[in-house]
Amino acid sequence: MQKLTIEYPLSTQSPKIIWDFISNAHGLEKWIADKVTEENDLMTFTWGHPWTERDTKQSRIIEIEKYNHIRMLWDYHEDTPDAVWEMSIQKSDVTGELSLLITDYAVDDDEEADLRGIWDDNLERLHRVSGL
């Protein structure tokens, strides 16, 4: 299991703006997946459209602290409970600038580059839809 950490600088001073993109299905659907639904502590992510091949994964919310972080566990990592993925809002003590810190896990070394590419694409979409 390989831990992957990505820090993405944000162009906002408001934790609330980024929180709205990372903490609920509506916000996540704008930049992570084509469709995201939320039921209790379970988020279902779907990539692809109904008329194409689709991929669906579920992630259980493990911990949520408003305006700070959300931690989840993918259904395919349930046998590895330490493989929690997280999105957290970080504030620089020096500059006061905000960053989005992504922590995720690759199953093996070969998957790490693919996972980094997926997150890079996601963060590019976040920037396009939000300007962040």
Image (cartoon, rainbow, N blue to C red):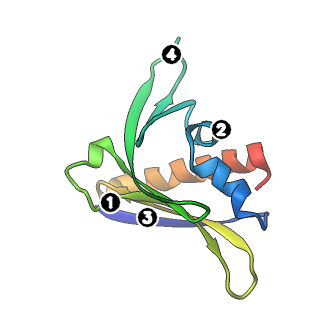
The residues bearing labels 2 and 1 have C-alpha atoms spaced at a distance of 29 Å
Q: Which residue is mark 1?
A: 109
The residues bearing labels 4 and 2 have C-alpha atoms spaced at a distance of 19 Å
Which image quarter is the N terminus in? Answer: bottom left
Residues tagged 4 and 3 counted as in contact (Cβ below 8 A): no
Q: Secondary structure at mark 1?
A: helix
Between tags 1 and 4, which lies in front? 4
Q: Which residue is mark 4?
A: 52
Q: Amino acid at mark 1?
A: Asp
Considering depth in this image, is 20 or 115 the residue closer to the camera? 20
Q: Amino acid at mark 4?
A: Thr
Label 3 crowd bin: few (<14), some (14–19), many (20+), radius 10 Å: some
Q: Which residue is mark 2?
A: 30
Q: Amino acid at mark 3?
A: Leu
Query: Residue at 28% of width from left, 49% of height from top?
Result: 77
Residue 83 vs 99, above or below: the answer is above
Instruction: State the mark number for residue 24.
Output: none
Considering depth in this image, is 61 or 5 the residue closer to the camera? 61
